[in-house]
């Protein structure tokens, strides 16, 4: 039997975004330290205790601890790689929208404020958008007074930049 060949989705080809604030980097470093010094040793102890009961094939506590350890090790590897490649966002005050900028825009006679950060810190409810998002990428490198138009095919929305901080 031949394994089916599937085309990767459009999101599979997006390169990782290593832009991050110092606060988020500190959070990732704390998580990494906790995983290495607390979670992994505890899970290894659990696995060794379950292994003492023998018969690994039907030993659910052992299999469960082993799966948890595999997940912890995967997360440790992921965090180490991300931390090594992290690019700290430094705010600019040159009058243009950059990573780390807080942008106040007027849209449909309403004032909205967005903070433009990397993909790791997106929180639309709090007004934090990615520089890779449709609106974030439109706002990048524009100045106060500029109007950007977000056209999603069905409607066009104009955003006028009122303030950048």
Image (cartoon, rainbow, N blue to C red):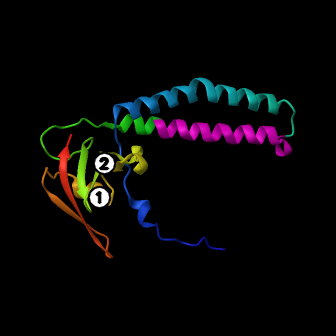
> Is residue 57 located in the magenta-colored stretch of the structure?
yes
83 vs 97, nearest the viewer:
97
10 Å crowding of disc 2: few (<14), some (14-19), many (20+): some
Where does the image place residue 9, in percent across and percent down from the top left? 46, 67
Tell me the SS state at disc 1. helix
Residue at mark 1 to residue at mark 2: CA–CA distance? 10 Å
Q: Quick one: label 1 or label 2, which is nearer the N terminus?
A: 2
Please name the residue shown 25% across and 60% down the image: 109
| Span of residues in magenta | 56-79
Query: Which of the numbered marks, if any, corresponds to residue 135?
Result: 1
86 vs 150, nearest the viewer:
150
Q: How many marks?
A: 2
Circles 1 and 2 in contact, beta carbons < 8 Å: yes
Compared to residue 39, the image places residue 104 above or below, namely below
> Is residue 112 located in the magenta-colored stretch of the structure?
no
Q: Which residue is mark 2?
A: 114
**Residue 24's image quarter?**
top left
């Amino acid at each position: 039997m031949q394994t089916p060949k599937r085309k990767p989705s459009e999101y599979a080809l997006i390169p990782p975004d290593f832009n991050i604030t110092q606060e988020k980097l500190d959070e990732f470093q704390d998580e990494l330290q906790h995983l290495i010094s607390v979670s992994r040793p505890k899970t290894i102890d659990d696995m060794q205790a379950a292994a003492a009961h023998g018969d690994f094939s039907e030993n659910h506590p052992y299999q469960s601890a082993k799966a948890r350890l595999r997940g912890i090790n995967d997360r440790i590897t992921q965090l180490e790689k991300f931390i090594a490649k992290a690019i700290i966002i430094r705010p600019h005050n040159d009058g243009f929208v950059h990573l780390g900028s807080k942008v106040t825009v007027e849209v449909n006679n309403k004032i909205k404020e967005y903070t433009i950060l990397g993909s790791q810190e997106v929180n639309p409810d709090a007004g934090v958008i990615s520089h890779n998002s449709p609106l974030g990428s439109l706002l990048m490198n524009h100045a106060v007074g500029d109007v950007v138009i977000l056209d999603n095919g069905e409607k066009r929305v104009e955003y006028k930049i009122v303030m950048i901080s």
